[in-house]
Amino acid sequence: MQRTISLLQRILDHELSGYIVIGLLLRMLLMPYFIWPYDIGAYRVGLVYFLNGYDPYFLHASIYPPLVYFLTFPLFTVAYHFGFSLDSLSVLDMVNGNSANGIVAYSQVDPWFLVLWKLPLLCFDVLTGIVIYSFVKEIAVDFKLPKRLFLVWFFNPFTLVISYVHGSYDILVAFFILLGAFLLYRGNYLSSGLCFGLGTLAKTAPIFVALPLSVILLLKGVGRSLSIAILKTNARAFLRFVAGISVCLLPFAPLLTEYSSLMYMGISREISITGGLNQWFFAADLQRSYWINQYVDTIQLVFSYFPLICIIVSLIFCRFLEFGQKRILLAVAFFTGLIYFFLPITLQPQYLLWVLPLLVVISAIKKHFLWILGLCSAAGFFFYLSIQSPRIFLYPLAMYTSLYKPEELIQYVSTYLNVPGVFSRYLRQDLCTLFGGIGFVGLLSMIILLIVNLWVTKNEERR
């Protein structure tokens, strides 16, 4: 008993405890009221097929890797046991008119179910903040920096919108990539591989980061005269890293093979800009983005060569850069960011979440990455507000309180949707394109700065 009390006392005395409590309260206010219900429906359909002994990938009934269903099965089970409804209450058709099919919070689900549904997001969100704190503590000289960067992550408006308004599960991917980078920095190659493997089971993006990293681990130092000892060290690191990935992926190899085939077959639909959240850079203005829809086949061909592109880039890195611990971190961020420029399905702004925790940690090494972090976060946040005006987020208040009337909401949103634009037909198209463009500039600047800092760090260490 005394030990338990002592442990609780240490937790309460920690410098993050008060901020975590405030952050949790803020998240709990958002959890019951907002969601993007498309994902819930897709998870539920895939899970029904799994539980009835059918192959959801072969039947084209699932669009998510297997790990999601291990998380959602107990959530759906608990919801069913307690009678939480999954039925959606939609905004009237008038709000969804005027080609505004990209509404973020267009329907409401049972608030108790939403709290339950977002509990995994809450857990991984807090864990990501703790990893950021621990990571920065190891690489920063300023003892105040770990707490400051934890706060930058924990109270970032964009991360709050993605997880607790949109209800996206991309925080899982962000956590596993970040933890994998942390363990790679520490030299725990097997554990790092396990993280990238688990991340791949949540979404396929981490494997495109792990692939070039494995090449770097095997060939690092190739620019120098290699000794047998260095080759053995590289081989051990490579084998442990790959073994960690394999332990996670091999048991699910048949499902993952079918899933990859399904995604490749359906990628034309993902690439083509037809509205919704795939408006990231082009804001559903089909006249402006017609060339994307015209060249879907070409984009899909580039996608098929992305693993080869990663290997070529990693070989170049191995030849010209001698990777140390901090440069491994920069390399993880580089290949995570590179996904946006080659994978055509990353048109959705919530995928920015994969790279943001890495940017937070890297800013402990180079402060100018804070500007990139702020640029990408602001672009994503204001993009969501611009789709159908900030007032749409008041919809739960109209449904469950007397503070707002649904008729007023409908009128406000409909008025906003018809405001003429400067460069496009509607103002919302101008705003979405503007913030999408800012997000693109932020990502491109991140890639350039990472390359520059990789080279500068190398030269600094030589001196």
Image: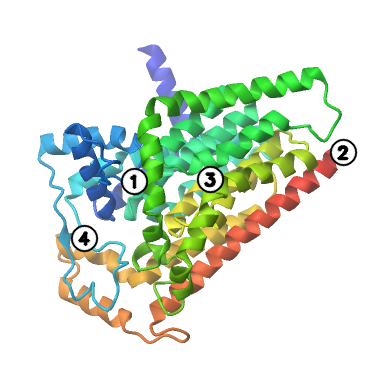
Residue position marked by numbered label 3 in the rendering: 357
| Amino acid type at mark 1 | Leu
In the rendered image, is residue 16 in sight? no
Residue count near mark 3 (Cα–Cα under 10 Å), binned few <14, some 14–19, many ≥20? many
| Amino acid type at mark 2 | Arg
Q: Nearer the viewer, mark 3 or mark 2?
A: 2
Horizontal arrangement in the rendering, residue 253 relative to residue 434 (left or right): left
Circle 4 sits in a helix, a strand or a loop, which is it?
Answer: strand
Residue 246 x/y as whole percent: 49, 26
Residue position marked by numbered label 1 in the rendering: 25
Residue position marked by numbered label 4 in the rendering: 107
The residue positioned 35% from the left and 34% from the top of the image is 255
| Amino acid type at mark 4 | Ser
Q: Tell whether label 3 touches label 1 (CB within 8 Å).
A: no
Residue 124 x/y as whole percent: 41, 38
- Mark 3 or mark 2, earlier in chain: 3
Cα–Cα span, label 4 and label 3: 30 Å
The residue positioned 38% from the left and 87% from the top of the image is 420
Q: Tell whether label 1 touches label 2 (CB within 8 Å).
A: no
The residue positioned 22% from the left and 79% from the top of the image is 411
Q: Tell whether label 1 touches label 4 (CB within 8 Å).
A: no
Residue furthest to the right: 463
- Mark 4 or mark 3, earlier in chain: 4
In the rendered image, is residue 221 in sight? yes
| Amino acid type at mark 3 | Pro
Q: Quadrant of residue 399?
A: bottom left
- Mark 2 or mark 4, earlier in chain: 4
Q: Nearer the viewer, residue 31 or 163?
A: 163
Residue position marked by numbered label 2 in the rendering: 462
Circle 2 sits in a helix, a strand or a loop, which is it?
Answer: helix
